[in-house]
Image: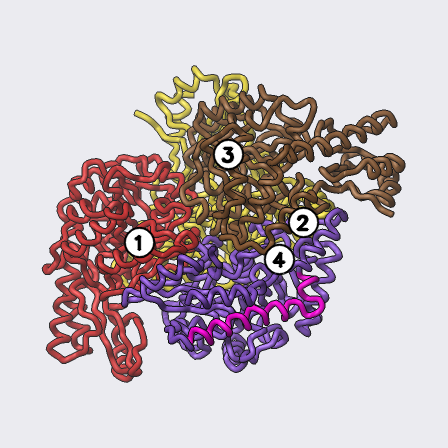
Chain colours: A yellow, B red, C purple, D brown
Amino acid sequence: MEIYFASDYAEGAHPKILERLFEINLEKNPGYGLDIYCESARQKIREACACSNADIYFLVGGTQTNQTVIDAMLPRYAGVLATETGHVSVHEAGAIEFTGHKVLPLSSHDGKIDAADIRRWLLAFYADGNHDHMVFPGMVYISHPTEYGTLYAKDELIGIRDVCNEYKIPLYLDGARLGYGLACPSADVTLKDIAALTDVFYIGGTKVGALFGEAVVFTRHNAPDHFITIAKQHGALLAKGWLLGIQFETLFSDGLYEQLGRNAVMQADMIRKALQDKGYHIHMASPTNQIFLELDDQRLEDLQRHVAVSFWEKTDRGHTVVRLATSWATTDAQVSELLRHL
Amino acid sequence: MEIYFASDYAEGAHPKILERLFEINLEKNPGYGLDIYCESARQKIREACACSNADIYFLVGGTQTNQTVIDAMLPRYAGVLATETGHVSVHEAGAIEFTGHKVLPLSSHDGKIDAADIRRWLLAFYADGNHDHMVFPGMVYISHPTEYGTLYAKDELIGIRDVCNEYKIPLYLDGARLGYGLACPSADVTLKDIAALTDVFYIGGTKVGALFGEAVVFTRHNAPDHFITIAKQHGALLAKGWLLGIQFETLFSDGLYEQLGRNAVMQADMIRKALQDKGYHIHMASPTNQIFLELDDQRLEDLQRHVAVSFWEKTDRGHTVVRLATSWATTDAQVSELLRHL
Amino acid sequence: MEIYFASDYAEGAHPKILERLFEINLEKNPGYGLDIYCESARQKIREACACSNADIYFLVGGTQTNQTVIDAMLPRYAGVLATETGHVSVHEAGAIEFTGHKVLPLSSHDGKIDAADIRRWLLAFYADGNHDHMVFPGMVYISHPTEYGTLYAKDELIGIRDVCNEYKIPLYLDGARLGYGLACPSADVTLKDIAALTDVFYIGGTKVGALFGEAVVFTRHNAPDHFITIAKQHGALLAKGWLLGIQFETLFSDGLYEQLGRNAVMQADMIRKALQDKGYHIHMASPTNQIFLELDDQRLEDLQRHVAVSFWEKTDRGHTVVRLATSWATTDAQVSELLRHL
Amino acid sequence: MEIYFASDYAEGAHPKILERLFEINLEKNPGYGLDIYCESARQKIREACACSNADIYFLVGGTQTNQTVIDAMLPRYAGVLATETGHVSVHEAGAIEFTGHKVLPLSSHDGKIDAADIRRWLLAFYADGNHDHMVFPGMVYISHPTEYGTLYAKDELIGIRDVCNEYKIPLYLDGARLGYGLACPSADVTLKDIAALTDVFYIGGTKVGALFGEAVVFTRHNAPDHFITIAKQHGALLAKGWLLGIQFETLFSDGLYEQLGRNAVMQADMIRKALQDKGYHIHMASPTNQIFLELDDQRLEDLQRHVAVSFWEKTDRGHTVVRLATSWATTDAQVSELLRHL
């Protein structure tokens, strides 16, 4: 029988969320996020972020959120700076370009952007006599954790914030896996830090305990005008908005979001330790819920008879990098079973 | 205490759907619609449509579905013909135009398009010496039931199909409320008819018993190349696709979809009969789950103290048209309560 | 031999313009409108408009100008109000929708919009409880002369300005044939009026004496940020911008633009008078350089053996409306020849 | 007095072109490319390309042409492969992304793409298990000469053609400076080769003797359906199309296009030889009309007192690369004067 470590969005929702959905199922609620659950969720998130005037909206998925937020905030003549390995750069089927905006690629440092690289890029852009013929930089996009499971240190975030301030460019943080970043023992960045240091970010639900859903937080009462209408225009406005509200209300009650994050990281740490003990080659060190492992192709074939993992990339040596992901739902038994096959 | 007839998407899902979601909640499923529930739902829908080679995809919401399907099927130089009262024309915040395509308006006949109007439009278009400077007609969009709750007769659909054949233009049917159309005693159009007469249509789940979700049926194995990628690009690809699959599998098991449709129409018929008996002015006759009622403003104010209804439009005479909608979940008790206030 | 009255863009440029192009042909000029001729033309236009702080840009063609200006000025969630007969509504192949914005149609009154219609539309929009799901009104587009050759009276323009002020919506005037409107003896709207009453307009060159080119005037130093970059992004930035500058400098020297306008209108008046004397049926009265004539089909066939005219529309009675257009270059001899065939 | 080597689009047109424009100035011609001059130019270009069934259209500028052609040919889900230094990648203000398509960057080899790089990219793309979530490769874009003045060898072009055939992807060649590539003594690629090896290319007029204009050649009768309408929609359809036709008819009569190309290259060769003799550091060797010279900042400041050159990029050593460009109009006297200052 197969066990599954291919992704962190392979299960439904935390049981408490399903229970709440059951409880309110036949209640009549107004649509489009104007219900009491969305309002309550907003209030809880504002408190968790220490950000009392944040504008908060709930959307369904990550690519949709990136597309809608970035398009809503960029001026017509501008693009978004992101690492060349960022989700918006590679794995959104061109959803940003679809809205007419270029993703301006920066080098990846283990999935992260370096503040110095941003500054250098911006300096070069404005020093270039032809820059009126180029796409202007209109936003910085980072993900935390990154697509490689890595995390920004607080100093690094402050560094990026400083560049953004200098050039008056908003900073947007993609938190698809935010719970797994916040729960990481080695992390020094809190939710409040993120709210303080970014202009807008989203708190991922799909991968961290919800059935689906992402909470967009405009940290400074700075939501673009008519964001509801813009979301509708992008096909991103869920009719039954309370389905999102109730999920985030639950995640942000009694420390559930933190607790779910901790489980995934703890299980991943167990796997990491075992891999190290067994002498495996970790492709890229990452402290969160994703593990990037390089295997020779025979070894991989054997493993895949028992364990579902995710293809990441071919390396030159004819080896393959695969991703193992834990989640809020990963159990000790599943990890033990995995380790039996490694 | 207030009762709610403002819309047909005010509840969650039919309890059987929630049960199924609970049952499979901690199963691990592959994403993006590649799971067994989606496959099973596809098979059940193909059978219900008598359309064995249909390509079927599951998306989250109605505007999103219209936007993605229309953009995917239209050539660059073409727009979509629709009534001026169609959802795509009025209530999608310009989601079609957002993808670069014009909605070409036709007159509404109680929410419907007349085949003769389409033919006249097409004749005039091609007769116009300047038509190379105009948006080409690339698709016909209809909704069934329409936004006014009305239904096409089978003859009318055949008439539209004939024009589409003549001009080699695909016919797309928006079935956001399809269940309420199929269940209508006076309807002579079946699901199989729709599959036979359209190139693509969608079966609405959001308003007919699902938590959310719409099933897009390309009736002739004619899905656009790489529709998955196109959906992703529109932000419309749900990561946990099985959430959609399990819902439609459930709706298309044991006649649930039909049964849910029947309840809404039966309750609406009860209300219609009572309104007639009481001498109310029905603004537009409609046989499905929506009732359009014209009230003077004082009467409306009174009613709204007890019943949530939906604003439709102001009429010249200082009266207002409101919409009452029943749903799969409307109970006899709710209808009785409503009638007490009318 | 055939004579040509089918359009007003069938000739090259006024000889003075060609002479000037010859004179500076081998001079080296910087590109993209940063040359001395563009600057000089801007200064002359500012003077002619009594609008010392106008931002002025030169683009190549009318559809391109409408597309670029409208897209640059509209917020993401908004569309542009225009008559259903407006150039942007019908004859630009969906160029506005291509940029993601809906053209919101208003009734045509001989090609014009009525201020009362705009106000009624805006009132209804904001009174509609669902307007967050609709395209917001973000601009009013008018053409002067209209596509039907008609002109706004100054009072009518003031009326539209007032509505725009009330709702804080910019007013954009398409002046593709502006010269023929300004030169009209019955006109009471001057170039200075237009500059005072609109937020942005363009002065048509293509149809009024230039080889090609349109001068966009942002009347209140209100050009969108980085308009050069936006124009480039729309493919609308001419490398050799001075070709546009020198043409408008010439048109706005020694009263040339006015003089060219007068010729076309005078010749059209001669034709109108003759048609009246001969008992022809004028389809729509218009005081500028376009004449809309309804003919029975035999009569039209005869005429077209000698005279090139432009198809306008079929009328119900089996007759056809054709357009005759004069231009800055129409000669007395051409008019005499035309009249011989009428 | 200053001399100008900053670009190759600083002059008007070859005098023969202006003469022809004068000759036909008051003729009446139909618009939009339906005139006899466009038809004659098409015929001459077909002959020069040995490509009797080519579909040929005339547009105004380079960015506009790239945008319109690429958008017209790409499917919705696809992007265009280009070097990261290509014009579409850097200097078109995001005009390709504006139409919803990503530019997929490949490494630059002196401004060129290597066939092996393309194949490697395509192999990796289709080997990637997640490629349905990525932008599909839908076209290869190359420029010839490149933005760095370099040229493809015939073998290199054949290599790229072979990859395109394997993957059934069209090959598009941007010939903004094509005349300067064809005229180069060391070039082994002819116009006929280009027509045989590409699916579509354009012959640059703006930089090679025309006032403005680019001739798009779909080499295999493979113009996208309704290309005229698509061009209009992009704001790219010139009303007075014959202005483009007459220019290309003239350029392709009596060997003018070749002759103009030769002058620029010959003058550039003179400058290159002189620079070599004087020991200058050529930043990137290029055999056509552009010379990329690295100078220390003091030297550059001195030079710019007398000569207009174009900024290219800052190099790490605090030096600057500048571009000198000759053109069809560059005279011996101008070159002598330049050399006096070097």
Classify the position of the C terminus of chain A by image quarter: top left
Q: Mark 1 against mark 3, which lies toward the viewer?
A: 3
Q: Position of residue C48 (x, y in %)?
A: 68, 71
Classify the position of the N terminus of chain A by image quarter: top left
Where disc 4 sits, the SS reads loop
On the same chain: label 4 and label 1? no
Q: Is residue D146 visible?
A: no
Q: Residue at x 70, y 46 (%)?
A: A130
Residue underneath mark 4: C13
Residue underneath mark 2: C240
Are the residues tagged 4 and 2 within 8 Å (C-beta)?
Answer: no
On the same chain: label 4 and label 2? yes
Gap in angstroms between the C-alphas marked 4 and 1: 71 Å
Say which label, 4 or 2, has the lower sequence index.
4
- Does residue B334 sit above or below D116 in this rendering? below
* B74 sits left or right of B158 in the view: right
Chain letter of mark 4 equals: C
Disc number placed over residue B221 in the picture, else none: none
Where disc 2 sits, the SS reads loop
Give, as a three-letter code, the residue at label 4.
Ala
Viewer-side residue, D117 vs A227: D117
Viewer-side residue, B80 vs B38: B80
Viewer-side residue, D65 vs A222: D65
Give, as a three-letter code, the residue at label 3.
Val
Viewer-side residue, C3 vs B196: C3
Magenta region: C248-276
On the same chain: label 2 and label 1? no
Secondary structure mostly taken by the magenta-highlighted segment of the chain = helix
Disc number placed over residue A21 in the picture, else none: 1
Chain letter of mark 1 equals: A
